[in-house]
Amino acid sequence: MSDLDINKTEQELRELSETVLKLARKQGASAAELSLNRGAGLSVEVHMKNVDKLEYHRDQGLSLTVYFGQKQGAASSGDLSRNAIEDTVRAACNIAKFTSEDPYAGLADKEFMAHDYPDLDLYHPWDLQADQAIDVALECESAALAHDQRIINSDGASISTYSGLSVLANSNDFCGLVPSSRHTLSCSVIAQQPGSDAMQRDYWYSTARLSEKLEAAQDIGVKAAQRTLARLDSRQISTRKTPVLYSAEMARSLISHFTSAVSGGAQYRKSTFLLDCLNTQKNQKVFPDFIHLYEQPLIPQALGSGAFDKEGVATRNQDLVAEGLVQHYLLSSYTARQLGMKTTANAGGTHNLTLQNTGQNLEEMLRELDTGFYVTELIGSGINAVTGDYSRGAAGFWVEQGEIQFPVEEVTVAGNLKDMFRQIVAVGNDVDLRAGMRTGSILIEEMMIAGQ
């Protein structure tokens, strides 16, 4: 479903942004920044061949931050009528008048604004009608249920489509528009071995900017069933130290722990196990020499693409880690000022952060693992951001001589992130492109597995 007139919406949001900025100046604000969005979508959920949910979505909103010198105030509204906008501006300005001065507050410097940026081809609305969506979701679930008699139940299949336009503007003469779309199809099922009370659940999904790039409904259903069946007869293993291979989907979490540790906020608050870890500060290697982690923000149609960050600062290709050394922190203008540095266009996060692989496919990664634990699910969050201590529930497969032997559940993988990063042995080319962070499977030389 897409009944959004993008050209009309673009003009309306441009005019609204100009109105909001003028109102803020009229109220006495020395600077202001805002984001406006409007979008529409459809989502359907089915369960055991019945429709559980059918929703049409229409949303819009305004988020505004104003500055009175070094004083800051913020307000938001889901109503874009003239009266609501005036109330929102007035509220933000009143808040700013009562806040304390913050010497680091303010807009990103004008010189960093993205005034000339490419169209990243992110907008591909899907004219999906409700009856079509129901048929696709049912096809997906039916494929999973019909795959094997041991698939005894379904957690459901769902399909969603959303397209919209967001505008970011500020009083540094920046106004950036981002039309975008996102479509997702998923399925989750339950399997049980005959004669056993134990059941297993797993899922699969596909997501893309273009509906044509989604995996076929039948393929998603079959893969969900296969993944679930592979977990039947899971067992625990004894406590031991062993090599650990993180699947591509799980490997993203390891990189996320690193990006959190090198964020500007963690650094200036001194609440990170990688404090002062820049190449220029300590010349210390966080990763092995072969690790190359870099941003590619301008990939057309990619899920993590963006020509500017949440402050309007122009993004660019840049190394975050090269030859195992941290090249820069992830900085917004605020955190950069706290550290006496310059923004890295990472207000709001990274853009298509990519871990360069070492060339092996999954089968080759399993052979390199040889004997150890292949992690396909992580449970809970036992991460100490200050010390780097790491402990998470996990499930996956026990591997011997490069071959999967049996499924494993109810174990804990533990270590320290500093050691884990340094002990990365290889990065697979089985890259998962379903998110804004791109990595293949990651093999770690040794971790503690707590089991029976």
Image (tube, helix red, strand yellow):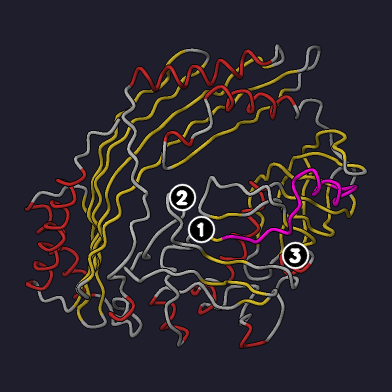
Q: Which mark is residue 303?
A: 2
Q: Which residues are magenta?
A: 354-372
Question: Residue 12, how many percent across, how many down?
Answer: 13, 51
- Three-letter code, disc 2: Leu
Nearest the camera: 349 or 115? 115
The structure residue drawn at horizontal position 38% and vertical position 77%, both measured from the top left corner, is: 333
- Three-letter code, disc 1: Asn
Question: Residue 403, how many percent across, how many down?
Answer: 87, 39
Q: What SS does tag 1 mark?
A: loop
Residue 53 in the image: above or below residue 169: above
Q: Residues within 10 Å of mark 1 (few under 14, many from 20)?
A: many
Q: What SS does tag 3 mark?
A: strand
Q: Which mark is residue 99?
A: none
Residue 219 in the image: above or below residue 290: above
Q: Quadrant of residue 107?
A: bottom left
Q: Residues within 10 Å of mark 3 (few under 14, many from 20)?
A: some
